[in-house]
Amino acid sequence: MSFDPASYVFSQPSAPTAIRASTVLPARRENVVLRTSDGHRLVGELALPESGEVKATLITLHPLPTHGGFMDSHVYRKASYRLPALAGIAVLRFNTRGTGSPRGTSEGAFEEGIGERLDVEAAVQFAVDRGLPNRWLVGWSFGTELALMYGASEPVASEVEGAILLSPPLHRATDVHLKEWAASGKPLKVLVPELDDYLQPAEATERFAVVPQARVVGVDGARHLWVGEKYAGRVLNEIVGEVLAGVAGGAAGAGGTGLPQEWNGPVATAQA
């Protein structure tokens, strides 16, 4: 049975609640289906602010499904738990073709990042069709390859503001794709763990030098999977700071330090 985001049970604590890994804040959450141009149904979830305007939209691209990556990979799960309430940001998560999670399994099979181009296009088109503003690609590991290979070419490029990359391995994405990003002029923020297994900050700075507008941020002590609340929280702060820079009320998260660590309102707890 597919996980129902309406199953979260919210309560009103008598005092502000510390935001922890399993803390779920209020949002309008719905299971969604994306349809690719080659006929696959991809399962996902959209989390929207409970009230007020949507200031930005994250279209998340998950890590490698053959190595455990899916729409519930922990940084994206925490983004959906927190960012609609804390920052007015919509979070779209989905399983690429052939990928399964508690939400369900998307149709198709893993295609080494080739057929997944249509998955990226379907996700962006879904966000456009729903009228979600200020759309950003957020890729993590394998997801960064998809963002780099397909985010700066049409039909995606004209529909997104830019991209944020978490732990890019630069295995599938090449200098050809980086030069496409350079030509697009679109913002590219690159978060690189100091202890990454594939690409560390010094090499990342060298590789991304071909994209003048790319900003490489090395994160001391972090590893490829951003394990630990300290590092997941840093990622969310950096994302918010990037996508809300220039948006009214967008100072939260600027510089990687701004999201609240407590919530004074209804909360739920996610199952591990």
Image: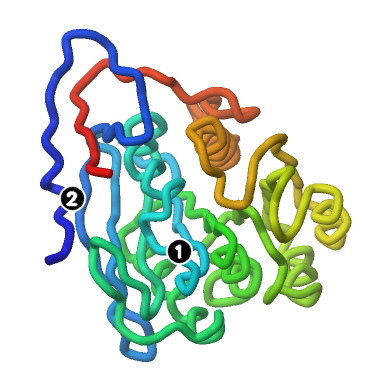
Residue drawn at 76 percent across, 68 percent down: 178
Tell us which disc is closer to us: 2 or 1.
1
Residue drawn at 45 percent across, 71 percent down: 65
Q: Is label 2 in a helix, a strand or a loop?
A: helix
70 over 54 or under it: above or below:
below
- In the rendered image, residue 168, in percent from the top left (x then y), is placed at 67, 59
Q: Nearer the viewer, residue 53 or 196?
A: 196
What type is the residue that disc 1 sits on?
Gly
- In the rendered image, residue 211, in percent from the top left (x then y), is placed at 81, 59
Tell whether 229 sits left or right of 206. Answer: left
44 over 263 or under it: above or below:
below
Residue that extends furthest to the top in the rendered view of this protein = 15
- In the rendered image, residue 72, in percent from the top left (x then y), is placed at 36, 55
The residue beneath circle 2 is 5
Does label 2 or label 1 sit earlier along the sequence?
2
What type is the residue that disc 2 sits on?
Pro
Quadrant of the rendering where the N terminus is positioned: bottom left
The residue beneath circle 1 is 69
Tell whether 142 sits left or right of 134. Answer: right
